[in-house]
Amino acid sequence: MSLGGSITLEDLETDPYPWYARLRRGEPVCWVPVARAVFVTRWADVVRVIGDDRVFSAELAGSPLSMTIGRNLLHSDGDYHAAVRAPLAAALRPSRVRKTMAGLVGELAGELAGGLRKRGEADLVGEFAERLSVGALCEITGLPPLPAETMRGWFTAIAVGAANFDRDAGKQAVADAASGEIDDLVSAQLRRGAPPDSLLAALPGVEVEGRKLTGAEISATVKLLIVGGMQEPRDLIGQAMYAYCTDSRVRAAVADGSATEAHLVEEALRWGSPVGTATRRVTEPVEIGGTELAPGTVVAAVLASANRDEARWVDPDRFDPLRQDLRHLAFGGGFHACVGAPLARLEATTAVAALLRMAPDMELAGDGAAHGWEFRGRAALPVRWPPTTLVRRQRKPVAATRAMVVAERTSECATVLGLRLVPADGAALPEWAPGAHIDVHTPAGVRQYSLCGDPEDAGGWRIAVLDNGKGVSAWLHASLRVGDHLEITGPRNHLGLGDAPAYLFVAGGIGITPIRAMVAAADARGVPWQLLYVGRESGMPFADELRAYGEHARVWLTGERGRPDLHEELVTADGTAVYCCGPPSLVSAVEAFAAARGLPPVRVERFALPGGAENVLRAGERSFDVVLHESGRRLRVGADETVLQALERAEVLVPSTCRQGTCGSCETAVLDGEPDHRDSVLSHEERAAGEVLMVCVSRARTPALVLDL
């Protein structure tokens, strides 16, 4: 018996990867009777199959999927496929997804995580990933809000039918019953009128083969969207979080900042392959992998096997969030590449970020085994996290602005004023984490100040203000008294103290304000840390308090000792997380030091841009164009103005608060062109990606930028 002939459906459902490895080594193109298809398992051969739609057609009227849901996008070719795909592709392109779905997905992920946070345990599949997927799916398709349990039942039943290779009548009856329920729902929604701009509103207008899509064809498309829109993001989130909870290397890479949420998601796509195969039909005699195939042969290009092919990947069975080349096939390829990939990625990265914020120390609390081969995922992912992660008191959500009263006014040093602000209505304040700042609104303008008190103090917030003789800071020093009222916005946190094996904090003068709370948090965690606090004595608040930490904290007075040589004064271990806040010269020196030591990129907080906000426009600036994607308008940005000013001149509204590149409120997606980043919000990775820019300060390296506006 051939190797393929010995494979059972139970083998594939339990764990197909050992079988795929054996097939790649011994029978890379092999007839597998239980699947009624020839399995193609090597990377190069799979790429060929999914990329050549002339020889390997997707038209499969007799496939289990087509028999379950009817003629559909996945198993069709040519003009029919192109016509049905067009409205889906328009609605699901990356820029459109960011614009229409990012806010909803982020809000829903935050609500779900917030609801779980206090419990200390959860099933991340059933109580989080599944509900997030269903919420996003109903929104973009135009289906009415549905319970996750209903959608799960439909998906499970259709999946049974789609994998019914043994033509079991009982299985097909289950699938057909669910299919009928979906038909009834779609028909009713179309009669009522689908929400504008939804996929369900666009599909009836599709013309194909000289006619409009039938109700059955529209319903088949919705069924396919249910399968992909629920299963792919749900199982992708489960795979990524399983790796995080069970692999210390993954956890460490996230903690030290070397792996982002996007890294986890892309590696989970490769390693877990939520969709296992792409099925095709041979249209003419062809040889592949040394095997001759006749016309009519059904071929299963095994995406999951290609994504673990030893000839393509180093150590392919290991989940490696730092893997550099992630050109995987999890979403297929060619004309039939998954149209919903941008939304699945958005949901998964947003979900992982929300979960890691909620409980970075979560761990597996039960059986999280994966099952399946056509659709592979985890039925449940039970996790728990220790009580130290939990919110300790009930607080109000963050409001856009709030009224505060000055409760205390103190002198922190010769040039720094300390203020304790309490809510005017006496209510508890929202929680904040070390590194957070607020926007203070005054008659002299708006400025950001770091919160430098105790994060556990829900009754008041502390800030420290350097008297620089101008603007908001000068007004606060000269005019503000105990009992006066202020409006503030926030808190927001672009800095944030992540988990790390060790910390290095470097602060210059007033830059100690975000670092002060971070030092206290690191000390409370019991991990190694050190602080170098640099400046002139007259402008160094909290110096005596920090000296009390002993050898961990050094206060370096430049008036007495000059500037420190960082390479001589600092000792760091591998993986040390570096945080810095201070003047541009200090920040630049610390960034150079960290790079020379091979440390992760420095996390930086600047409350003024390098060289000062007045130097956003530099000598020798050149003009460039910005193209507004939605309307096609082209605007000229002069050498003497910012992108934001050009947009405002054209009456294009972009929210902006600081106008100095420090608050992040004017972040705008870049669809084409290379930005010249001049903000202090984006990380090194985000700058290198070039996907967004802060229009209040950043410019262009190319003649034009296409913005998602």
Image (tube, grey):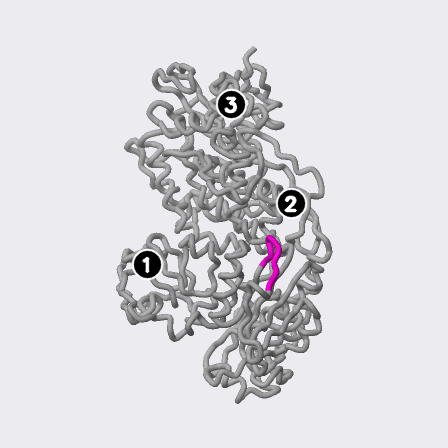
Judged from the image, the secondary structure of the residue bearing numbered disc 3 is helix
Residue type at tag 2: Ser
- Mark 3 to mark 1: distance in Å? 46 Å
Most distant residue in the right direction: 387
In the rendered image, which quarter contains the C terminus?
bottom left
Q: Which residues are magenta?
A: 570-577
Which quadrant of the view contains residue 536?
A: bottom right
The structure residue drawn at horizontal position 61% and vertical position 23%, both measured from the top left corner, is 11
Task: Please tell me which of labels 3 and 1 falls first in the chain.
Answer: 3
- Mark 2 to mark 3: distance in Å? 30 Å
Above or below residue 228? Residue 529 is: below
The structure residue drawn at horizontal position 50% and vertical position 85%, both measured from the top left corner, is 474
Q: What secondary structure characterizes most of the magenta part?
A: loop
Which sits in the foreground, 479 or 466? 466
Image coords of residue 132 (percent x, y): 56, 48
Q: Which residue is mark 3?
A: 24
Q: Which residue is mark 1?
A: 701
Q: Which residue is mark 2?
A: 248
Residue type at tag 3: Arg
> What is the number of callouts on the image?
3
Label 2 packing within 10 angstroms: few (<14), some (14-19), many (20+): few
Above or below residue 245? Residue 583 is: below
Residue type at tag 1: Arg
Image coords of residue 409 (percent x, y): 62, 85
The structure residue drawn at horizontal position 54% and vertical position 17%, both measured from the top left corner, is 4
In the rendered image, which quarter contains the N terminus?
top right
Which label sits on residue 518? none
Above or below residue 359? Residue 147 is: above
Judged from the image, the secondary structure of the residue bearing numbered disc 1 is loop
- Regarding residue 576, the answer to whether it shows in the image is yes
Task: Please tell me which of labels 1 and 2 falls first in the chain.
Answer: 2
